[in-house]
Image (cartoon, helix red, strand yellow):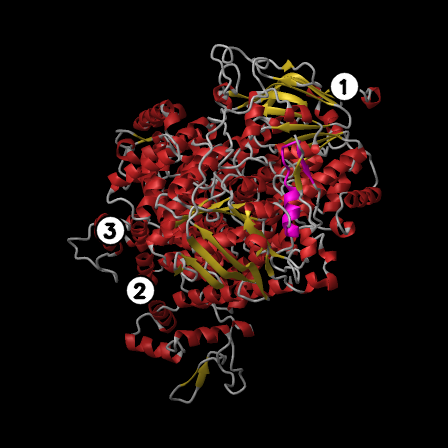
């Protein structure tokens, strides 16, 4: 082992001018170009960028696992001074898992479904340290306890599918820690998890990193998360590192136009859809084989200078006076980085009209029977319980909650795909609760439409964009003949700011953001009055999110549409919602204007949710509230208050009332509603979770 | 005249297939030069396996097409002197050769195999198509609606799958059963499926413009219905619906049974595949989008789901034509399929196998032909699968 | 688990009843019965005589009733002629009608008599089944390990030279139906053309006379077709598993390639082929019939062909019961095995 020859003051990982290409039948596709970064012992390095920027490729290159088509075409990766790029399989095998370990995005997929957790964990020290089986299992038990999983013995004996997503990710982390690696690579470790679960995992990773002194390479698209976890970061764009430096430097003294544009396009506290709208990055991410000459970001950059930026490849330059801060920009010295963004004209606040939709006491129960012929006990899943709210014309009502909170069921019931078990859904003055979609008239159907979450799924892949919009027009009875309909279709493309030529394109030729625009055009084909937007931007890259959100807002203002915005992302909710409804396990736990919900008093769940959302702003101070455990299953919800199993305020309520009785919906000042047993004094004593430090 | 040497035999065969070679060369040249514009079909030419498979399949397709030009003698002419004679034997009148020998009745093996390709290439894809129509028409609602319908249909499919195929054939072809008209009644149901499929397909899409819909569906019903009635009706049988003057499709009872058997054997498997894909696709957002804009179920099944299931279905279609070819051979092998005089490969193998140890070539040549076609189809399916996954 | 098993067995019985009823219906159509009457009572009898013969032998009862009798859930028919002699389904000729049981169907072990072989169906089938049983045993013994090995080896490293070679072999073998490979093998190994004559082109009809020489070709013929099919399924499943995220996890844990395949991939990769192997049985039956005809081996398949060809209703029904049971039992085993191999289903 050469490990003894390595001096701990030297970098653990040193990547120099790394270039990686994928070779397809047609061409060589460069995935990463001229990438350099250094990770010191005990340091956490963040790799940030949008999808397709090459950040995961870098991680896999470090593991030397690029697959058949990928190849390192230049540069070196030194780990503890030894170059990984020219190691053979056998040498790599000794390093993988023992010195460098990796944690992946999809915990379920990265665990072997047919092997017990214990066996998968114990395998690691048995391979690398030749540990006996019993010792390895003992160690596994200890590490499982370390990652704060309850009942380690039971967990070791279970199969992956018996655990929840959060537990699985803890197991993956435990597996990576089994032989105390020197470097831990985390590839979007929390993307597949709910925010409150994510917060727990992030805390765990930070603590364990300190406890074991492990260096980390943390890959994420979420700047807030990087701020929470990392010491240094490296921003990537289209295969290149564009800016690297200490977190504080990059966040507050950024030196690259892309980093700056990125920060301006994400909703940070203080942004407002009317007075301080987000600034989206124009254009699209270039495809790997369509990269421009010179600076990759050039075509989308507001500081672009023709003849300079599009000439030759741009080198990384060091910024003087900062700690190892570099930027890949030729105009770094000419740009005034402190200048405020060109003020986007403040938009007049949209007028809020009369109530258009009212839900009263809506319940939706599902009966789930196990067994093929109805044998077995029937279980009732209460997907929605006593849902009561109203939405007004031109208003944005955000519905917030994590998976299993009943927000998708709510959407289905409203759309008429399912009928509610009881209650009233009043659209204007008609009750549509018991009218399934087949029985609704065209006007009702076209008046209530939906925008879906996944842009890759929202359009039928084998129909042209134009045809799909025309079909919606046909169904909604718009236009008298084909000519009128295709004219209307082109108008709709204009409305969502897509070129008219897109009408003949197939969905696969469109980017995610463009697809989402087509989805919006389709939803507005029949002049929708109420639009349910189910996480419309959560699957998009940050730079595109702002543009799509703006578009939605703009159409809303123009058409006076009521927008029901379903989301788990509180930052975007704060940015665009007029009122917010927080849901947990089928119950509305809090309902109020955006200001009311985002400031105390909170429902304990809202409080935890607010504290869990990472915010990419160094000025923001957050109170850490990490919820214990997972969201209970809707199949057997806890008795009493649905949130009592994870509530940190439970002890403030006397007599175990929370475990016995469902709290009533209480109306506080200004129509702010909270479903909680806490006393008014407790509410009054609540401190704000988020505070912005004075500048 | 002397018998031909093996070299001369090969040369003659190559020469006989000249139209096929020309057609193949043209197809490949055209396809390869435009392959970037031809979608999945074009991508096939990126895969060696796919190209080989496509080549073999097209070889037999063209052979079937040009069979009258390729075959050298009439398929039924018997020359007593040439019974079981080896390949390359000269005719007694010296006018030519049986280049691949004569069979047990003194017929030309080469010509019979070439003519046999016609039977196979005509029946196998068509019968498979019917099986697909039936499988799709039942599999779509089973997967989409789920529940009781799904349970019932799946049970039925499993039942048919558990039925010993051979027994089914024997039962269906017994003259006594044919006389009762049972296979025809089954045919009445099965052949109605494509018509139903087409009507559902057009109606679901165009019901929003009733005028156009009425014209289209009316046309389909008129033409399709006529073809259907003509297809299932046959003079002097139990099902005789149209007057002879209007009955333009004559399907001999044997072929009908072949069709019914092929559909019976394949449809349950297709049903299962379709059902599985539908279960997957129906969770997609574009299906929800269609539902939320109030589309009818059949529109969603046929226009939103089915086109996106085409990849695996096309691959399976190729494979299944191969199985159908094998099945046709099996039927022929038991003497159950077409008439014993028919030159189709299965029957020829069956006729030739009794004298295998004395004269192997009458069975060997069609055996090779059948094997190569199935091989080609398998390779084609593999190529398609590989290429469609590369997207 | 027990509940699952019970439900499966219940479904299996329903299927068996449905299928045998269809066979019963098809074999008992009027023209078939007429043929039976003519073959039993003389081919030149008049229509009236046919009718009376059918009536005397219980064939005029409603179909469901007769099916019930055959199954053994309805009492057997009896017929007293003008002489007062009582005949009946359950009354053996010459025995006393009073002492005979009322029910005598499949359930009571009475499978009827074969017209072709002139002996009880149960003995005929039992004897023939043993020949086929031996054949199938050897087919399974050769086919399963070879095909799994080929599939795993090919799927282990997708696109490698081994993969290409083995895949080509398996595709070629699926493209060769039994009657083609049988013909080719006979020509090569057993005919005078090549003069090899290593094996015999015909098999003995007797269980006692099983030798390598006369059983090799039939076994090889059936196995060859199956090998290709199963190997391709195994390969597909193996390649899919090898690209799974958890295989990457294992590789990046430092597990050696050998152990990645043996410990991590194999079990997951075998789930799908296991079902396939079991579902092969209906097709094997097909192959068995072909091979037994081709090699003149007097086993179950051969009997089936004889029964069907000669309208031997009782024998045909017996054969179909066996065939259906074999298929359904294998399906059951495949379900159980699937559940056993796949912990995701086993535990939930």
Q: Nearer the viewer, mark 1 or mark 2?
A: 1
Q: Quadrant of residue A204?
A: top right
In the depicted structure, whether residue B209 falls above or below residue C171: below
**Marks 2/3: CA–CA distance:** 43 Å
Horizontal side of residue B92 vs B390, given as left or right: left
Tell how many labels.
3
Q: Is residue B20 visible?
A: yes
Q: List the residue tagged with mark 1.
A: A81
In this rendering, would B112 be left or right of A20?
left
Q: Position of residue C69 (x, y in %)?
A: 47, 76
Label 3 Cα neighbours within 10 Å, binned few <14 / some 14-19 / many ≥20: few
| Chain for disc number 3 | B
| Residue farthest along the front direction in this orientation | A669
Task: Determine whether the residue tagged by mark 1 lies in a helix, strand or loop.
Answer: loop
**Chain under disc 2:** B
Query: Which x, y percent locates residue A35?
Result: 63, 19
Residue under numbered circle 3? B210
Closest to the observer, A486 or B242: A486
Q: Residues within 10 Å of mark 1 (few under 14, many from 20)?
A: some
**Is A581 contained in the magenta span?**
no
* First-in-chain label (2 vs 3): 2
Q: Nearer the viewer, residue C247 or C211?
A: C247
Q: Residue at x 63, y 34 (%)?
A: A224
Question: Could you tell me how far apart the alpha carbons at marks 1 and 3 are, in whole angstroms?
Answer: 76 Å
Q: Which residues are magenta?
A: A602-622
* Residue in view at x 68 percent, y 40 percent: C264
Q: Which residue is mark 2?
A: B180
């Amino acid at each position: 082992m050469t490990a003894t020859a390595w001096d701990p003051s030297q970098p653990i990982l040193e990547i120099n001018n790394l270039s990686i290409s994928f070779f397809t039948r047609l061409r060589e596709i460069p995935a990463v170009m001229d990438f350099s970064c250094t990770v010191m012992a005990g340091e956490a390095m963040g790799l940030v960028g949008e999808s397709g920027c090459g950040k995961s490729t870098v991680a896999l290159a470090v593991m030397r696992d690029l697959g058949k088509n990928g190849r390192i075409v230049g540069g070196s990766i030194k780990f503890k001074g030894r170059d990984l790029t020219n190691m053979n399989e056998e040498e790599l095998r000794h390093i993988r898992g023992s010195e460098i370990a990796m944690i992946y995005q999809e915990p379920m997929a990265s665990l072997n479904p047919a092997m017990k957790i214990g066996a998968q964990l114990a395998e690691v020290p048995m391979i690398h340290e030749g540990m006996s089986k019993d010792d390895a299992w003992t160690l596994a038990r200890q590490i499982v306890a370390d990652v704060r999983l309850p009942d380690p013995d039971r967990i070791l004996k279970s199969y992956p599918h018996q655990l929840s997503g959060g537990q699985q990710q803890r197991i993956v982390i435990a597996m990576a820690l089994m032989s105390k690696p020197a470097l831990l690579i985390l590839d979007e470790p929390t993307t597949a998890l709910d925010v409150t679960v994510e917060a727990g995992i992030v805390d765990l990773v930070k603590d364990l990193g300190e406890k074991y002194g492990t260096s980390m390479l943390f890959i994420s698209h979420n700047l807030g998360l990087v701020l929470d976890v990392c010491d240094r970061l490296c921003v990537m764009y289209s295969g290149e590192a564009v800016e690297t430096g200490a977190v504080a430097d990059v966040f507050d003294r950024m030196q690259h136009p892309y980093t700056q544009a990125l920060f301006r396009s994400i909703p940070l506290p203080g942004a407002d859809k009317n007075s301080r709208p987000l600034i989206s990055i124009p254009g699209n991410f270039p495809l790997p084989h369509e990269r421009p000459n010179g600076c990759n970001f050039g075509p989308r950059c507001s500081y672009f200078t023709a003849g300079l930026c599009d000439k030759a490849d741009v080198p990384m330059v060091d910024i003087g006076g900062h700690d190892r801060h570099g930027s890949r920009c030729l105009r770094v010295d000419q740009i005034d980085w402190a200048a405020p963004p060109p003020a986007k004209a403040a938009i007049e606040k949209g007028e809020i009209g009369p109530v258009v939709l009212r839900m009263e006491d809506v319940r939706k129960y599902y009966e789930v029977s196990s067994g093929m012929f109805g044998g077995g006990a029937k279980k009732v899943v209460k997907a929605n319980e006593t849902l009561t709210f109203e939405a007004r014309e031109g208003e944005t009502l955000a519905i917030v909650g994590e998976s299993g909170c009943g927000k998708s069921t709510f959407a289905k019931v409203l759309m008429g795909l399912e009928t509610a078990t009881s209650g009233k859904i009043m659209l204007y003055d008609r009750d549509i609760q018991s009218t399934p979609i087949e029985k609704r008239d065209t006007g009702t159907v076209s008046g209530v439409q939906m925008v879906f979450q996944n842009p890759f799924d929202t359009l039928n892949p084998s129909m042209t964009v134009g045809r799909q919009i025309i079909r919606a027009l046909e169904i909604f009875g718009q236009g008298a003949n084909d000519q009128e309909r295709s004219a209307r279709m082109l108008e709709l493309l204009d409305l969502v700011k897509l070129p008219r030529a897109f009408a003949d394109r197939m969905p696969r030729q469109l980017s995610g953001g463009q697809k989402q625009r087509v989805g919006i055009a389709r939803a507005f084909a029949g002049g929708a009055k109420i639009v349910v937007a189910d996480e419309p931007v959560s699957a998009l890259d940050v730079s595109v999110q702002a543009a799509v959100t703006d578009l939605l807002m703009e159409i809303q203002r123009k058409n006076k549409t009521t927008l029901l915005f379903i989301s788990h992302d509180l930052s975007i909710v704060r940015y665009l919602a007029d009122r917010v409804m927080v849901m947990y396990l089928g119950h509305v736990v809090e309902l109020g204007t955006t200001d009311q919900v985002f400031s105390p008093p909170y429902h304990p769940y809202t409080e935890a949710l607010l504290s869990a959302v990472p915010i990419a702003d160094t000025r923001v101070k957050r109170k850490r509230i990490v919820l214990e455990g997972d969201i209970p299953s809707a199949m057997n919800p806890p008795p009493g208050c649905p949130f009592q199993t994870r509530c940190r305020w439970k002890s403030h309520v006397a007599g175990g009332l929370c475990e016995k009785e469902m709290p009533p919906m209480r109306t506080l000042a200004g129509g702010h509603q909270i479903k909680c047993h806490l006393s008014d004094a407790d509410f009054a004593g609540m401190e704000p979770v988020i505070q912005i430090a004075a500048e | 005249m002397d018998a031909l040497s093996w070299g001369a035999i090969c040369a003659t065969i190559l020469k006989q297939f000249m139209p096929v070679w020309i057609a193949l060369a043209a197809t490949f040249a055209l396809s390869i030069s435009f392959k970037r514009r031809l979608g999945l079909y074009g991508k096939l030419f990126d895969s060696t396996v796919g190209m080989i498979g496509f080549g073999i399949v097209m070889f037999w397709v063209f052979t079937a097409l040009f069979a009258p030009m390729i075959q050298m003698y009439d398929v039924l002419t018997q020359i007593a002197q040439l019974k079981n004679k080896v390949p390359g034997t000269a005719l007694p009148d010296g006018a030519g050769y049986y280049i691949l020998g004569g069979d047990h009745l003194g017929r030309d093996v080469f010509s019979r195999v070439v003519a046999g390709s016609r039977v196979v290439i005509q029946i196998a894809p068509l019968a498979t198509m019917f099986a697909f129509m039936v499988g799709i028409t039942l599999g779509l609602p089973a997967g989409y609606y789920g529940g009781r319908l799904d349970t019932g249909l799946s049970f039925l499919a499993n039942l048919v799958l558990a039925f010993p195929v051979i027994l089914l054939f024997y039962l269906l072809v017994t003259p006594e059963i044919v006389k009762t008209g049972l296979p025809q009644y089954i045919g009445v149901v099965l052949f109605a499926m494509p018509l139903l499929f087409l009507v559902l397909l057009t109606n679901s899409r165009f019901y929003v413009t009733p005028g156009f819909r009425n014209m289209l569906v009316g046309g389909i019903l008129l033409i399709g219905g006529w073809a259907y009635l003509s297809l299932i009706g046959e003079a002097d049988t139990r099902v005789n619906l149209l007057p002879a003057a209007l009955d333009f499709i004559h399907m001999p009872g044997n072929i009908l049974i072949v069709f019914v058997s092929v559909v019976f054997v394949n449809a349950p498997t297709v049903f299962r595949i379709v059902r599985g894909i539908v279960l997957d696709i129906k969770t997609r957002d574009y299906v929800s989008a269609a539902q939320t804009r109030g589309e009818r179920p059949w529109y969603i099944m046929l226009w939103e789901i089915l086109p996106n299931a085409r990849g695996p279905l096309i691959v399976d279609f190729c494979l299944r034509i191969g199985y159908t070819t094998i099945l046709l051979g099996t039927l022929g092998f038991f003497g159950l399929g077409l008439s014993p005089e028919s030159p189709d490969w299965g029957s020829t193998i069956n006729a030739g196998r009794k004298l295998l140890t004395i004269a192997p070539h009458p069975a060997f040549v069609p055996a090779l032909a059948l094997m190569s076609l199935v091989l080609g189809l398998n390779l084609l399916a593999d190529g398609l699968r590989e290429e469609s996954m590369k997207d | 688990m027990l509940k699952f098993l019970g439900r499966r067995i219940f479904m299996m019985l329903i299927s068996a009843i449905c299928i045998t009823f269809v066979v019963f219906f098809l074999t008992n159509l009027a023209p078939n019965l007429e043929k039976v009457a003519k073959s039993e009572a003389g081919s030149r009898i008049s229509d009236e005589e046919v009718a009376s013969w059918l009536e005397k032998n219980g064939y005029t009862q409603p179909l469901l009733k007769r099916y019930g009798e055959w199954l053994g859930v309805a009492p057997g028919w009896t017929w007293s002629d003008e002489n007062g002699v009582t005949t009946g389904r359950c009354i053996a000729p010459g025995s006393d009608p009073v002492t005979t049981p009322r029910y005598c169907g499949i359930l009571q072990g009475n499978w009827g008599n074969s017209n072709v072989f002139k002996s009880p169906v149960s003995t005929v089938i039992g004897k023939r089944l043993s020949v086929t049983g031996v054949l199938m045993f050897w087919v399974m013994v050769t086919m399963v390990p070879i095909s799994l090995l080929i599939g795993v080896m090919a799927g282990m490293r997708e696109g490698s030279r081994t993969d290409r070679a083995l895949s080509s072999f398996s595709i070629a073998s699926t493209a060769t139906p039994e009657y083609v490979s049988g013909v080719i093998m006979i020509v090569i190994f057993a005919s005078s053309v090549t003069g090899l004559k290593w094996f015999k082109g015909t098999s003995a009809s007797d269980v006692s006379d099983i030798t390598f020489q006369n059983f090799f070709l039939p076994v090889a013929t059936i196995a060859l077709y199956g090998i290709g099919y199963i190997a391709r399924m195994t390969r597909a499943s193996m390649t899919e598993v090898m690209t799974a995220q958890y295989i990457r996890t294992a590789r990046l844990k430092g597990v050696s390639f050998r152990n990645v395949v043996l410990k991590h991939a194999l079990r997951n990769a075998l789930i799908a082929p296991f079902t396939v192997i079991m579902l092969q049985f209906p097709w094997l039956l097909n192959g068995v019939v072909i091979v037994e005809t081709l090699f003149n081996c007097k086993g179950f398949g051969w009997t089936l062909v004889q029964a069907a060809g000669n309208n031997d209703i009782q024998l045909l029904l017996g054969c179909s019961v066996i065939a259906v049971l074999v298929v359904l039992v294998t399906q059951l085993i495949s379900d159980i095995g699937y559940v056993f191999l796949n912990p995701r289903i086993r535990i939930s």
